[in-house]
Amino acid sequence: MNDIILLKQGEMVLKGLNRREFEVKLLSNIRRRLKTFGTFKVYSMQSTVYVEPQDDARMDEAFEACKAIFGAMSVTRAAACAKDKDAILQTTIEYLGPTLRTVNSFKVESKRADKRFPMGSIELSQYVGGLLHDHFTHLKPDMHHPELTVNIEIRDLAAYVHGPAESGAGGLPVGVGGRMVSLLSGGIDSPVATHMIARRGVQVIPVHFFTPPYTSEMAKDKVLKLAKLLTKYCGRLKVDLVPFTHISEEIGKNCPEGLMTIIMRRFMMRIAERIAIDNGCTAIVTGENLGQVASQTAEALAVTEACLSIPTFRPLLAMDKNEIVERSRVIGTYETSILPYEDCCTVFTPRRPRTKPKIAEVLDAEEALDIESLVQEAIDAIERVTIDI
Ligand code: ATP
Ligand code: MG
């Protein structure tokens, strides 16, 4: 039997002139993502991507991987056969037989994209449904609430038989939305924000600030582990690890305690912006959320981004914490995010952070620091790690 994976394109089919470009990106993302599972022939026609396994292909793993690739609305495993009613019936019996034996009711739904096929879709459904019923005598036809829907699609190259489709990852193919820097801490929020922005077709460059010896090697490993989990969605990642100890200590020594957090965050932003510009990125993404902590009031967010010339995007801004947690569970980062390794902000946290900082006083406090050389020193010491899928 010719087992195949079909991915139905999502909202990208709405794109006018860019559509072909989106499709090319989706195909190349799928090809790259499936390389580790053997050889596949990947092509697209009629808003559908076809993934055909060759000799050595591992289909179960490939199918799981396809469910995480942005740009597909649904993903189905199907059996391909000749566009002939009896070949279709025979394939259905072989391919879905094991499932049909375990259910009590069914229906057949046909779609005829190839209008040259001699039967209408209702006629084909009735033909296959009638003979399936003869073959599996325990089955009852049920048009409204069948336990199994047998889908038949007549397309250009072949007919395809499959059970229910699974949800795809949605969104747009990674790469069509350009590149952005994503600030990745070890917490729950930033991996979710990174996933959300990647889902809109953005290729992310994760940036992490670490503060040895206040934070351990384990904290860094945790972030790299989170990045590894995200490759499932984002593809291969180049993570920038930025040493932040000197900057934190200088701020601790020279700035008012209540403004420490906001000034540290502005340094993160400045460094992120430099990395963004050097890598052709259009924006900075963070896991900030309105009102979650003292540094995330509207006033504080405004002061945080005031030192930038490119935009900051905050996909989680208006979400509730429980919604963010739920998403992190779904995408598979939660268990790693809750591992108890401190990030730099928990070490240098003021007792009473100012919730409504004024830009003038922050600029004034920053006068005590040699901003340019601190930023440059951190940038010169960046460690770039490539994380493969
Ligand atoms: P998270 O759960 O993502 O750590 P949080 O609720 O703990 O977020 P903060 O610690 O104030 O909030 O951080 C807000 C955002 O700033 C993070 O979501 C992340 O994007 C960025 N950020 C904070 N600390 C770091 C760090 N050490 N390295 C990189 N980015 C960071
Ligand atoms: Mg945090």
Image (cartoon, helix red, strand yellow):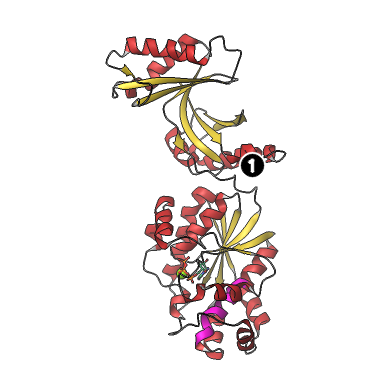
* Residue 96, above or below 333: above
State the image quarter where residue 352 is shown: bottom left
Looking at the image, which residue sits at the far left?
138
Q: Position of residue 365 (x, y in %)?
A: 60, 88
Q: Is residue 303 magenta?
A: no
Identify which residue is drawn at 45% across, 64% down.
221
* Residue 314, above or below 94: below
* Residue 191, above or below 112: below
Looking at the image, which residue sits at the far front?
144
Considering the whole magenta stretch, tell me its main secondary structure.
Answer: helix
Q: Position of residue 334 (x, y in %)?
A: 39, 58
Q: Is residue 265 magenta?
A: yes
Identify which residue is drawn at 31% across, 17% down.
140
* Residue 161, above or below 212: above
**Within 10 Å of the Cα at label 1, are there few (<14), some (14-19), or many (20+) other Cα atoms?**
some
Identify which residue is drawn at 51% across, 16% down.
121
Pick the residue in front: 362 or 245.
Answer: 362
Residue 381 visible in the snapshot:
no
Q: How many marks?
A: 1
Q: Which residue is mark 1?
A: 25
Tell me the kind of residue under disc 1: Lys
Looking at the image, which residue sits at the far right?
17
Pick the residue in front: 53 or 261.
Answer: 261
Helix, strand or loop at mark 1 = helix
Magenta stretch in the rendered image:
258-269
In the displayed structure, does residue 265 sit left or right of residue 98? right
Pick the residue in front: 28 or 187.
Answer: 187
